[in-house]
Image (cartoon, grey):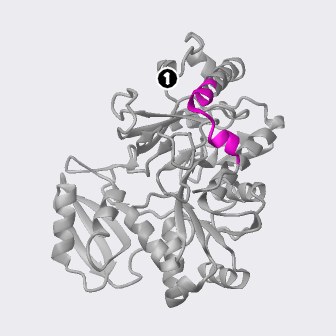
Amino acid sequence: MSPMFQPEIESMPRAQLETLQLSRLQSTIARLNDRVPAMADRIANLPAPGSLDELANFPFLRKSDLRDNYPFGLFAEPRNNLARVHASSGTTGKPTVVGYTDDDLSVWADCVARNLIGAGCEPGHMLHNAYGYGLFTGGLGLHQGAHRAAMSVVPVSGGNTERQLMLIDDFAPEAICCTPSFALTLAERLGDKARDCSLKVGILGAEPWTPAMRDEIEERLGITAVNIYGLSEVIGPGVSCETQAKDGLVIAEDHFLPEIVDPETGAVLADGDVGVLVLTSLTKQAFPVLRYWTGDLCSLTREPTPDGRTHARMSALVGRADDMLVIRGVNVYPSQVEHTLLAVDGVTPHFQLVVTRAGTLDSLHVRVEGTNVDTDQVVGALQSSLGISVTVTVEPDGSVPRSEGGKLNRVDDQRNL
């Protein structure tokens, strides 16, 4: 059974939770109409929803809308009322900017504290925080949540792997938060000593990962590894997270209302169907979002958990609608490739997709690492899974790019589309 940080909220009866959601949704829409002219222009003629189902009558908000209103055009509070500003971690063009009041920061801390306690962290534990600090929401988001959960924090941020290994050895933290690929990098560097380190819990996110990758991280580091999800446009990490049961990422539904929609039509899909995750914030003051199109593909269930949690759970992400590769008319997701590779004997989780185009014909080449790997077996597994021809090279250890704490880009698309 996974403990709860706020049991009266996390186990709230479903009918009571939905009543709370509707009231907060109506308040959010009123706030947007009153305080955000760019949103009022889009929704002013729509009646206030009388039920949660009527949310589907409202338009989607997309990342392009944030860029079009850069930097503060979608804020519901003046700049002098903000406690903090964050921005997306993109490397090109203008970032997407988000803001927080003191109350927003408090809500965020509560959400992350729920995640940490549900994952198996305890008051008094130490958290080695290897998420990036600064404009990226990861570092400070986990930092403030750990404080709320009465944990101490080592604010290492990303990079400098050797220093991180030294601090883990010297400080003996019980928990770590970082990307899954960086957890594997740490395990690689620790080698035979990995299972002897102090870590017991890993709160891992910011990039897709597969059950096979989780198994390898848990086996090599001797930890329980849970998946955390968030995005700066909605609040940051803490929108949802797995508990120790690892049976789906529990969404903080008192603060974020989820929908799953068809990627092509935008129609709302039933629980269990895979589609694009759309999120509406219910309590944010500075930067409320209405039907934000995350681009992330997953499914939902609203069945309560055996330990009494009643909030909806999302599946692990199966890909991104907007980051999907289209190769010779076939949709290819890096997570799908990873899942296939890790089922082949000897292949490690380190790989890179190289996409090229000669004339009008796309080619997919996959770089992998492993020991005693049958290249033909890898090619056969990938072609069976993806439905297209591929070429594969098995390369020496360390050839494929590694994470040094930040998000890992597994795709080298050379087509110049």
Q: Residue at x 44, y 57 (%)?
A: 208
Q: Position of residue 75 (x, y in %)?
A: 70, 32
Closer to us: 34 or 110: 110
Q: Residue at x 32, y 62 (%)?
A: 339
Closer to us: 195 or 60: 195
* Relative vertical location of residue 256 with respect to residue 117 in this rendering, above or below: above
Membership of 17 in magenta stretch: yes
Q: Position of residue 26 (x, y in %)?
A: 64, 20
Task: Name the element at disc 1.
Answer: loop
The region drawn magenta spans 6-19
Q: Position of residue 192 (x, y in %)?
A: 50, 90
Q: Say left or right for 224 vs 367.
A: right
Farthest bottom residue in view: 192
Q: Which residue is mark 1?
A: 59
Crowdedness near tag 1: few (<14), some (14–19) or many (≥20) residues, C-alpha within 10 Å: some
Membership of 15 in magenta stretch: yes
Image quadrant containing the N terminus: bottom right
Q: Say left or right for 391 vs 200.
A: left
Type of amino acid at the residue the image marks with label 1? Pro
Q: Residue at x 52, y 40 (%)?
A: 312
Q: Residue at x 59, y 56 (%)?
A: 2
